[in-house]
Amino acid sequence: MLTAHLESVWQAVAPALPGFTVELLPTIDSTNSELMRRARAGLHEPVLLVAQEQTAGRGRLGKPWTSPPGHSLAFSLGLPLAPADWSGLSLVVGVSLAESLHPDLRLKWPNDLWLDGRKAGGILVETASAGEAPGAPRMVIVGVGLNIARPPASVLSAAGALPPVQPAGLAECRMGLTDGEALEAVVPPLVRDLLAFASLGFGAFAARFARRDALRDRELVLSDGSQGTGQGVGADGSLRVMTAQGLREISSAEVSVRPC
């Protein structure tokens, strides 16, 4: 069912990204890893790489991301980009995906899509050099994993990735949704939003993120053991947390967070 939607995606995106191609692979270790390999080999044309199965998918901080066939959608979008400031890019990706998929989806800073407090999708953003000249664009690779159906516990357990809370599937809020329909729904708007981010920065998306912020006003535990209350995000996309010691601004490279 996925292949029927690839042509529509290409037709929608190609006018904005000359040279854009779409590829479908039956299986791959990781779509992000593959596009990083290509970028380091000097291939910098815009590309959408979709996998029917990932055998070594990964998320933020190297955590495994399972992509069982028939239950998920895994893809990576690579394109050269030269924003003045890269801050907040993963939040922009989350905003774009959530708005394209369903009003009930919320965003757990910095890179998860939530449905009713359960993870429905994840984002991994990486960059690689796309030229040696000063100011040359970098190749940004946006990896997306979406649970279409709720992943069976047996699959998660076999992959060594059984979470404390059962993940959600998008079909819970969009009955009958297929991986191809999800791909066609999210990729063209994502390309438009990435190009807008390059021109306008995170500030143009801050209000849109705030409307879907899952952590605002929630009690949080940071991975360094401190606790506080979510206060939204800063102008650069950093997480603002009010702690007993005062307001902290957290970058995604520093700590991870979870609700109490």
Image: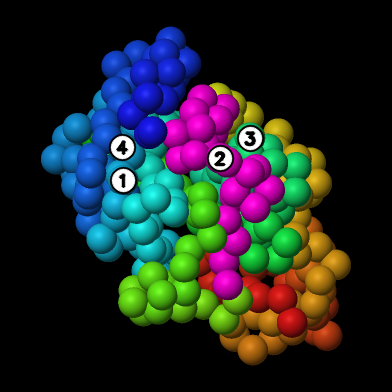
From the image, state whether disc 4 or disc 1 is nearer to you. 1
Task: Answer with mark 3 or mark 4, whichever residue precedes in sequence.
Answer: 4
Amino acid on which the number 3 mark rests in the picture: Ser
Q: Residues within 10 Å of mark 3 (few under 14, many from 20)?
A: some
The numbered dot on residue 49 is 4
Label 3 with label 1: CB-CB less than 8 Å: no
| Magenta-span inclusion, residue 35 | no
- Which segment is the magenta one? 166-189
Q: From the top left corner, tell me how far across and down residue 218 is, in percent.
A: 81, 71
**Of the pair 30 and 173, the residue shown nearer to us:** 173
The residue that label 1 is drawn on is: 52
Amino acid on which the number 2 mark rests in the picture: Leu
Task: Answer with mark 2 or mark 4, whichever residue precedes in sequence.
Answer: 4
What's the distance in space between the residues labelled 1 and 2, CA to CA?
16 Å
The residue that label 3 is drawn on is: 100
Q: Residues within 10 Å of mark 2 (few under 14, many from 20)?
A: some
